[in-house]
Image: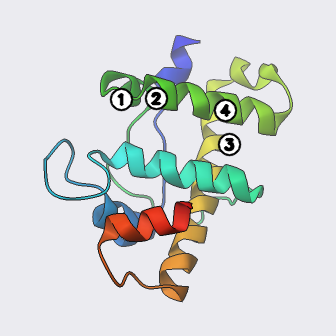
Amino acid sequence: MEELFEVQFKYERQYRDKIVYRFAAAQGSRDKNVFSYHWQCFAWAAIVGFLTGKPKKLENALADRSFSLKTMRTYNGERIAEALICLCIAKAGTVDILKTPESAIELINEYANAGFYKLSEMLDDNPVSGSDLQWVLQEIF
């Protein structure tokens, strides 16, 4: 199981530039952003993707700074990491997906990519008119 925590997530550079850099502070900085870490924004996109129900293969250039479930666990995101694992198992329909950590992380990547795509569409259709936090809360609720 620990191997699963070592595999690096991947996401497309276009979403890093449009969404992650916009909503997440530089790793650990205290700038006024919605998220303190890039991985939190990735997890948000993954959850949006899991909710939309359709994974999306990564097709474009990948972001150069990746992270893992271990990073999440290290920075107070153990429950979020566990939730992503549970969602992965639910979508795969079997706990056996964890036997191949690369496959499990790839599935999470594809749902995160779908979530980033959806968030990108939402930003295009409903641009931020107030603060980024207000926009995120409005879209969540």
Q: Is residue 115 above or below residue 71?
A: below
Q: Please name the residue that numbered disc 4 is placed on.
A: 104
Query: To which quarter of the image does residue 133 belong?
Result: bottom left
Whole-percent x and y of residue 77?
40, 29
- For disc 3, the marked residue is 107
Label 3: few (<14), some or many (≥20) within 10 Å? many
Outermost residue on the right side: it is: 93
Q: Residue placed farthest to the top in the image?
A: 1
SS for dot 4: helix
Residue extending furthest toward the left: 30
Q: Secondary structure at mark 3?
A: helix
Give percent across and percent down for residue 74: 32, 22
Q: Which residue was labeled with disc 2? A: 69
Q: Earlier in the sequence, mark 1 or mark 4?
A: 1
The spot of residue 123 in percent (x, y) is 48, 79
The mark lying in front, picked from 1 and 4, is: 1
User: What residue appears at the point 64 percent right and 61 percent down from the top-left corner?
Assistant: 114
The amino acid at mark 4 is Ala
Contact (Cβ within 8 Å) of mark 2 with mark 1:
yes
Residue placed at 70% from the left, 53% from the top?
51
- Report whether 88 appears left or right of 61: right
Circles 4 and 2: CB atoms closer than 8 Å: no
**In which quadrant is the C terminus drawn?**
bottom right
